[in-house]
Amino acid sequence: MTDQHAAAGGADPDRIGKHELDRLTMAVTERFAPHLQAAEAAVREAERAVADAREALADAERQEAERNYRSDPLVFMRATVGEDLEGLARKTTPKKVRASFRYLLDRAVELAEGEVTGYRRDVAAARRERSQGVAACRKAVEVAVAELDGARAMQQRVFDAERAARDGLELLREKA
């Protein structure tokens, strides 16, 4: 019956007109635009993360190369306090014992302060190494590159979904 209607010169009511096809094209564009933009933004963010991670790695490697050897003064302070204690044991007069004790006390307090400060410095350095050291930065680069690969794969899937919708629209045009 539709063929008879079309053959008779009337428009087929089931056929899609140019105006409707244009509207569908615009709908596809509008509906995919936010997703395409979000995918592009995710890729840009992942690329930025890779660049930042590589920069942090370069900084960590440079800092490690520039780090000079530092001897631990606490080793010598510990030995000195031990020697001062032995010296105190050898003192024979009360005046010399008191003077030697005051000196020992000052050195022992300095040693205690140095031990606390050294411990805190070592803990902070270990934490910094775990979070900002060369190994941590290399791992961060690996993670950032993997995330970038994932973002690019996601973006490609978004492109594929849009392509499928546009291919369907093309088939609709051909059959309309």
Image: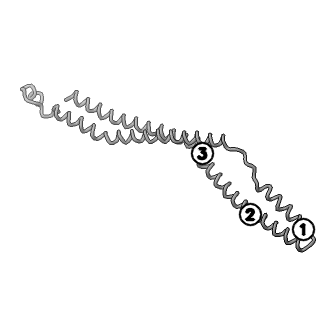
On the image, which quarter does residue 12 sit in?
Answer: top left
At horizontal 61% and vertical 50% (from top left) the residue drawn is 128
- Tag 3–tag 1 contact (CB < 8 Å): no
On the image, which quarter does residue 84 sit in?
Answer: bottom right
Q: Secondary structure at mark 2?
A: helix
- Tag 3–tag 2 contact (CB < 8 Å): no
Q: Nearer the viewer, mark 3 or mark 2?
A: 2
Residue holding disc 3: 136
| Relative image position of residue 151 (x, y in whole percent) | 44, 39
Q: Earlier in the sequence, mark 3 or mark 2?
A: 2
| Relative image position of residue 83 (x, y in whole percent) | 86, 61
Q: Give the alpha-carbon distance from disc 3 to disc 2, as whole Å.
A: 32 Å
Q: Give the alpha-carbon distance from disc 1 to disc 2, as whole Å.
A: 21 Å
Pick the front one: 33 or 98 = 98
Outermost residue to the top = 7
**In the displayed structure image, the side of residue 166 where residue 99 appears, left or right:** right
**In the displayed structure image, the side of residue 114 where residue 156 appears, left or right:** left
**Vertical placement of 127 versus 57: above or below?**
below
How many residues crowd around disc 2 within 10 Å: few (fewer than 14), some, or many (20 or more)?
some
Residue type indicated by callout 2: Ala
Q: Secondary structure at mark 1?
A: helix
Residue holding disc 1: 89
Pick the front one: 4 or 74 = 74
Q: Quadrant of the C terminus?
A: top left
Q: Earlier in the sequence, mark 1 or mark 2?
A: 1
**In the displayed structure image, the side of residue 87 where residue 48 appears, left or right:** left
Residue holding disc 2: 112
| Relative image position of residue 172 (x, y in whole percent) | 23, 31
Q: Quadrant of the N terminus?
A: top left
At horizontal 42% and vertical 42% (from top left) the residue drawn is 42
Pick the front one: 121 or 53 = 121
